[in-house]
Structure formats: structure tokens, C-alpha cells
């Protein structure tokens, strides 16, 4: 797919080399099954890149879900992602399927992956390595075929040095890094954006 078509389809405005490079990598890796780490500051559009990768992949007709790891309380994130058995913790009144079960065959976008608790990181690593997971409170191993795309706006190598992020998980996710530049790193796009906003507002 041509870059221009991708930009039109997903509403991306700009033509700077850094932005084009990020898009080229996204388009190239989309048909593969690789886990991808998308880095960049808050608000640069990392989730749009995850949607591009999903929609240009062989999984495009399957489910896509975006999960903000920083917005889920630490006590419930394992249950949200992997599910739980009835009675496995206080408040677990019934059995629950997690995202890795409900999105089977599709794509999960894990935003703010740096906020994920260490214990959950271990579960995610197992899933990425073997395609297997165990629900909270269960003993039965389940299989899941989900592609994982992750994003962060923090310096993960720094978190690794602080013991807050698993180095093996980082390398497993970071097989193909995509860096989405901030606007100040692609100043040549400001004029293009200004024209777009001006024409939008004048129509209104």
C-alpha cells in the first residue's frame, strides 16, 4: 500500500522524513506476526499506528482492542487481560474471560506498557513465548493466538535499570521499534497542518 493511501485512509497529515519513516516501518511489518513496540510522547498518535498495523494485517477481520495499562488498577489487570475463575479473589463472583481469550485471533494494543506491574509482565512474556496463559485462580493452561502491539512514552531501558521492567520482555516486544516523532521534531509539517485546520474551520 502506498504511503499516501495510508495517510488518507487513517487521516495522517504530514510529510516529514521522520513521520514517513515510521509509517514505512508500520506498513512493512503489518503483514508479519511480529510484536511491535511503538514509542513516542503522549499525543503523537501511537494508537493510530497500532490501528494501521492491525488493519493492514491478515488479522484485519478479527477483533482489535486497545488497553491502557496505566488506567487499570494493579489488582485487576491480570484478571482483565487473562481472565479469572469464580472465587479466585474477593469480588470474583463469577468466571470471567480476559482479553487474551476474547480477542483470540486478533490484535491487542497495550498502551503505556511501562505501567504494567512486574507480575503481569511475567504472564505476558509467557504468552508471547509460548502462546499460553493461565487464568487467575485456575490451574488449566490455555492457548491464545493474539498479536501484541505495545506503546510507551517512557524510557523503558531506564525502567529496566530501576528493576521496574523486565529486560527479556523489552527485547521480546522491541523486535521492530517504531518511533513516532513529536511535532517539534517535524516542524516542516506545521504549515501543512495549518492549511488543513484553516480549511476545516472555514468550511464550518
Image (cartoon, rainbow, N blue to C red):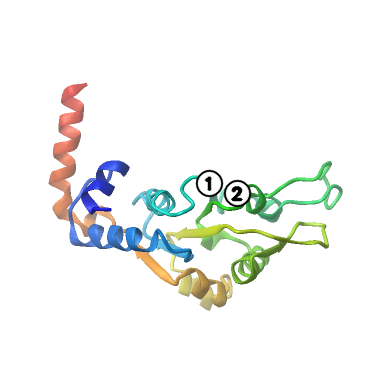
Element on which disc 1 rests: loop
Expressed as whole percent of the image width and height from the top left, the position of residue 108 reads: 54, 53
Where disc 2 sits, the SS reads: loop
- Contact between marks 1 and 2 (CB within 8 A): the answer is yes
Q: Which residue is mark 2?
A: 103
The residue at the point 32 percent across, 43 percent down is 10
For the point 16% across and 24% down, the residue is 202
Q: Residue at x 59, y 67 (%)?
A: 128
Left or right: where 35 falls relative to 199: right
Mark found first going from the N terminus, 1 or 2: 1
Looking at the image, residue 52 lies above or below residue 94: below
Residue that carries the numbered disc 1 in the rendered image:
62
Question: Closer to the observer: label 1 or label 2?
Answer: 1
Residue 58: where, in percent of width, then height?
46, 54
- Inter-mark Cα distance, 1 to 2: 8 Å
Residue 194 locus on image (x, y percent): 16, 40
151 vs 59, nearest the viewer: 59
Residue farthest toward the top in the current orientation of the protein:
204
Q: How would you rate the neighbour count of disc 1 (Cα within 10 Å): few for under 14, some for 14-19, many for 20 or more?
A: some
Amino acid at each position: 500500500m502506498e504511503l499516501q493511501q495510508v495517510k488518507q485512509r487513517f487521516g495522517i497529515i504530514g510529510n516529514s522524513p521522520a513521520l514517513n519513516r515510521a509509517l514505512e516501518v508500520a506498513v512493512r511489518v503489518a503483514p508479519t506476526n511480529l510484536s511491535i513496540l511503538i514509542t513516542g510522547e503522549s499525543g503523537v498518535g501511537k494508537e493510530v499506528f497500532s490501528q494501521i498495523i492491525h488493519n493492514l494485517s491478515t488479522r484485519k477481520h478479527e477483533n482489535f482492542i486497545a488497553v491502557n495499562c496505566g488506567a487499570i488498577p494493579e489488582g485487576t489487570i491480570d484478571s482483565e487481560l487473562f481472565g479469572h475463575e469464580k472465587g479466585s479473589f474477593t469480588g470474583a463472583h463469577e468466571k470471567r474471560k480476559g482479553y487474551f481469550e476474547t480477542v483470540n485471533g486478533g490484535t491487542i494494543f497495550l498502551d503505556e506498557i511501562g505501567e504494567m506491574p512486574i507480575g503481569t509482565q511475567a504472564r505476558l512474556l509467557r504468552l508471547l513465548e509460548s502462546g499460553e496463559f493461565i487464568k487467575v485462580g485456575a490451574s488449566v493452561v490455555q492457548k491464545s493466538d493474539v498479536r501484541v502491539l505495545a506503546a510507551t512514552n517512557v524510557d523503558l531501558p531506564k525502567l529496566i535499570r530501576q528493576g521496574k521492567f523486565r529486560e527479556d520482555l523489552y527485547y521480546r516486544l522491541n523486535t521492530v521499534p517504531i518511533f513516532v516523532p513529536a511535532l517539534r521534531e517535524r516542524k516542516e509539517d506545521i504549515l501543512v497542518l495549518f492549511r488543513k485546520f484553516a480549511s476545516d474551520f472555514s468550511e464550518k
